[in-house]
Image: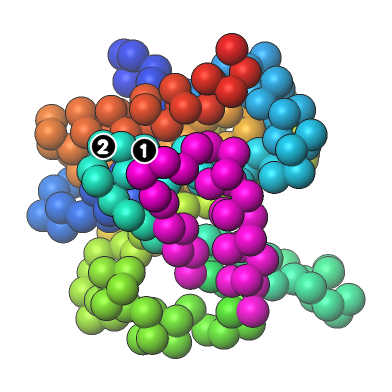
Amino acid sequence: STAKRPAELSTQVITQLCAAAADAVEEAIVNVLLAGEEAASLERLAKDEGVGLAALVYAAFALAARDLAGARAYRFLNPVITRDTPELMLASGWLVNLIPIHVKVRRDDDLLGTALRVRQVFADAKVAAQVPVVRVVQLLGSTLGLDLQGDRRPPIVSYLDGRKIPGNETWVERDFYGLTGSGYDDDVNVWVNRTDEDLHVTCSVPDTPEAVANVARFFSHAGGLLRALVT
């Protein structure tokens, strides 16, 4: 799928906002978190610290939710691959499930410390990888603000290293920025992509000035937190 870039490329993400506003038409907006060399530097730092780039990005989102909205936790569903047996290796299709992620944040938490917590939360949450997501929603729906009977997309955040996908070198010229849905229930609403060009996020945003401005502010703050580690 394709998405249009805003006039100013900043960094943004409030999952709750992206999944809300059921009466508004959604549009997909691409926001650059870090340029290529910045992303490469952050990736090296993440490896040295043993946390991984995705954990740092999710930690930045959690701290942005704290700093801008006073949140004490960042909650979302994260896709995990279920193609984990030999007989499934050659199967076609989208073999994934969703696991619940709950990252607590305190007033004095820093980015690296939060990223270490994110890594542990993911390790703990993998026990739910084989549990049908409908059951997860039944158990945690009220905590995550989900409604099985509603038509709103649940708060899904995903990370993809696009450099591992054949043909990724043509993405820029083809104006391709990863996956996001055009409706309320057909795809993820926040998709972080790592490419040779940059680290960016595609987000489905309610098509209102308030939503676009607030989501942009969120990602800009998160990107600033990441950039501060490598500048």
Q: Main secondary structure of the magenta part?
A: helix
Is residue 14 or residue 44 the one in the foreground? 44
Amino acid type assigned to the residue bearing label 2 in the image: Leu
Read off the magenta span. Answer: 100-127
- The residue closer to the viewer here, 127 or 133, is 127
- C-alpha separation, residue under disc 2 versus residue under disc 1: 6 Å
**Residue that badge 1 annotates:** 64
**Residue depicted at x 70% and y 20%:** 41
Q: Which mark is residue 184?
A: none
The residue positioned 39% from the left and 50% from the top of the image is 106
> Where 153 falls versus 108 (above or below)?
below
Do the residues bearing badges 2 and 1 touch, measured as CB atoms within 8 Å? yes
The picture places residue 113, in percent across and down from the top left corner, at: 57, 44
Q: Determine crowd level at label 2: few under 14, some 14-19, many 20+ residues with C-alpha closer than 10 A.
A: few
Tell me the number on the disc at residue 68. Answer: 2
The residue at the point 76 percent across, 44 percent down is 50
* Above/below status of 76 relative to 37: below
Label 2 SS: helix
* Location of residue 62 in the rendering, given as x and y in whole percent from the top left corner: 42, 46
Q: Amino acid at mark 1?
A: Ala
Is 16 placed left or right of 100 in the picture? left
Dot 1 crowding, Cα within 10 Å, few <14, some 14–19, many 20+:
many
Percent coordinates x, y for residue 28 in the rendering = 34, 38
Query: Helix or strand or loop: what does disc 1 sit on?
Result: helix
Quarter-of-image position of residue 151: bottom left
Res 60 visible: yes
Is 41 rendered above or below residue 98? above
Q: Quadrant of residue 156?
A: bottom left
Q: Residue at x 46, y 53 (%)?
A: 157
Looking at the image, can residue 30 be seen?
no
x and y percentages locating residue 144 in the rendered image: 32, 69
